[in-house]
Image (spheres, coloured by chain):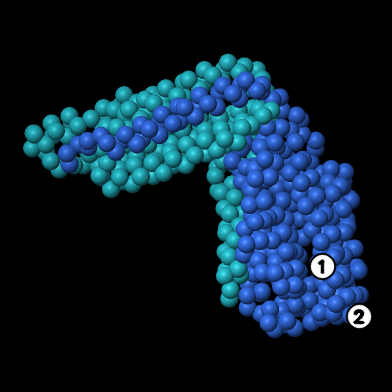
Chain colours: A cyan, B blue
């Protein structure tokens, strides 16, 4: 088998895999719907920020260890790590919502700059990469926990700023959003 | 022709007739004239080629020329049908439509150059590799477009999505069939041609079944035009979002530098 055959066969296989991924990733994602039928409220984690920050503080563990409860401190640390992981997941959700907002603006724009869209894609990939690294380190217990608090501050502030920016778009954005229903079950512009 | 190729030929011809009938009955031809023409041309190709292959043989010079000439015509028709489908999906979104064209104009020549580099120039193989090259460029362009439709919140009618996926599947299957068969059995030409036809007709028949199932539904209603934002909105909002996302990423990077609690 010569090299050109190998190259073409590899390209064909890669394209087929890409197509399968596009088809199945679209059907796998389901929107998170709450009981009243509307999509889950965004910025849900903001209200839990003080509790998360408190949970991630070192003082409780130090106090328990100093009082002679190392086992309890260990158990609580484990539970709080689980909470931190959930929190990190919700931060990711928030980040993705902001990205979708950016994409929605692009879709509704008469002119779209490739460079700007590529930058959005690059940022998204960068975030995903770092997110999974941090996630891994949290799961394995080798990551610091307290930095998540400052990270959430950043995301929350961004959400508020973007909500303000979108409200400035007024009726046009709202009308446009209504005309952009979901083409894959992954998300809905009304979320 | 071996019996299996005959059966597949008849099956694909009948399936194309079903697809053509559904296009007419369900009124798809009004919104998809090029796609309808593509199906009609495929039917004509089958009607013309079958007697030629039957009397002259598919390995004869007449069969070879007629086969590839008609293939070139249907490939051109397929391209037109695909552009028509993409236009229907994206025409309401001028910015994304324009960006898609720019991306395709940048990507396709690069893929074409890549195909040229890895192709050989001896005549019989060259035609086959030209066909492979076309399918590679076509599939890459389609995957790129489907990727954009996946990435952006753009409404795509299921019927159009299935038609595009059908084209994409067929091209990917052809690339694999051409590459693998060419690699293993081109030397045994007599065995090669029936196997190639069997695999090609099978993959095309699958596409036709998929299309027939989706075209059995009524043609989608005309989409309402979304109200677009102004240029200044796009100039102002996404950079703001990107700047903030960049800041989040920077903060994530700093995450590593913060000293963790002593375990």
Image coordinates for residue B118, horizontal then vertical, percent:
62, 64
- Looking at the image, which residue is at 67% across and 29% down? A111
- Looking at the image, which residue is at 58% across and 76% down? A1
Secondary structure at numbered mark 2: helix
Q: Is residue A79 left or right of residue A111?
A: left
Image coordinates for residue B141, horizontal then vertical, percent:
67, 50
Viewer-proximal residue among B92 and A82: B92
**What quarter of the picture does the N terminus of chain B occupy?**
bottom right
Identify the mark at residue A92; answer none if there is no mark: none
- Looking at the image, which residue is at 32% across and 34% down? B254
Assess disc 1: are there few (<14), some (14-19) or many (≥20) residues with their C-alpha within 10 Å of its C-alpha.
some
Viewer-proximal residue among A39 and B160: B160
Image coordinates for residue B236, horizontal then vertical, percent:
56, 21
Image coordinates for residue A183, horizontal then vertical, percent:
65, 40
Can you say whether B1 is above or below B75 in the image? below
Can you say whether B256 is above or below B163 in the image? above
Q: Which residue lies under the disc numbered 2? A: B55
N-term mark: 2 or 1: 2
Q: Are marks 2 and 1 in contact (CB under 8 Å)?
A: no
- Between the C-alphas of marks 2 and 1, the distance is 17 Å
Q: Which residue lies under the disc numbered 1? A: B68
């Amino acid at each position: 088998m010569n090299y050109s055959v190998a190259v073409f066969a590899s390209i064909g296989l890669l394209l087929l895999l890409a197509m399968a991924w596009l088809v199945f990733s679209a059907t796998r994602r389901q929107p998170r719907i709450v009981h009243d039928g509307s999509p889950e409220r965004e910025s849900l984690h903001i209200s839990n920020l003080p509790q998360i920050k408190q949970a991630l503080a070192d003082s409780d563990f130090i106090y328990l260890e100093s009082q002679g409860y190392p086992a309890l401190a260990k158990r609580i640390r484990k539970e709080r790590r689980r909470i931190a992981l959930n929190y990190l997941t919700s931060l990711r959700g928030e980040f993705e919502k902001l990205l979708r907002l950016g994409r929605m603006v692009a879709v509704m724009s008469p002119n779209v700059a490739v460079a700007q869209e590529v930058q959005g894609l690059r940022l998204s990939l960068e975030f995903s990469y770092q997110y999974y690294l941090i996630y891994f380190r949290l799961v394995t217990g080798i990551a610091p926990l307290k930095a998540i608090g400052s990270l959430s501050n950043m995301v929350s502030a961004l959400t508020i700023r973007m909500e303000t920016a979108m409200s400035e778009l007024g009726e046009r954005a709202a009308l446009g959003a209504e005309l952009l229903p979901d083409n894959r079950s992954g998300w809905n512009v009304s979320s | 022709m071996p019996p299996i190729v005959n059966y597949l030929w008849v099956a694909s011809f009948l399936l194309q007739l079903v697809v053509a009938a559904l296009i007419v009955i369900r009124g798809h031809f009004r919104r998809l004239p090029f796609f309808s023409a593509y199906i009609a041309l495929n039917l004509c190709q089958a009607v013309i080629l079958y007697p030629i292959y039957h009397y002259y043989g598919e390995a004869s010079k007449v069969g070879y020329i007629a086969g590839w000439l008609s293939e070139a015509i249907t490939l051109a028709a397929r391209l037109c049908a695909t552009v028509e489908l993409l236009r229907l999906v994206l025409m309401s979104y001028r910015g994304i439509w324009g960006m898609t064209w720019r991306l395709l104009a940048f990507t396709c020549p690069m893929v074409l150059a890549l195909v040229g580099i890895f192709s050989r120039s001896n005549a019989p193989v060259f035609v086959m590799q030209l066909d492979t090259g076309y399918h590679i460029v076509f599939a890459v362009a389609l995957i790129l477009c489907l990727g954009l439709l996946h990435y952006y919140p753009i409404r795509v009618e299921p019927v159009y999505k299935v038609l595009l996926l059908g084209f994409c599947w067929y091209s990917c299957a052809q690339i694999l069939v051409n590459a693998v068969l060419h690699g293993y059995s081109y030397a045994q030409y007599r065995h090669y041609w029936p196997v190639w036809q069997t695999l090609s007709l099978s993959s095309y028949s699958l596409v036709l079944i998929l299309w027939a199932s989706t075209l059995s539904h009524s043609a989608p209603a005309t989409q309402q035009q979304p109200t677009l934002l102004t240029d200044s909105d796009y100039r102002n909002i996404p950079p703001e979002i990107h700047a903030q996302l960049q800041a989040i990423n920077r903060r994530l990077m700093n995450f590593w530098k913060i000293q963790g609690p002593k375990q």
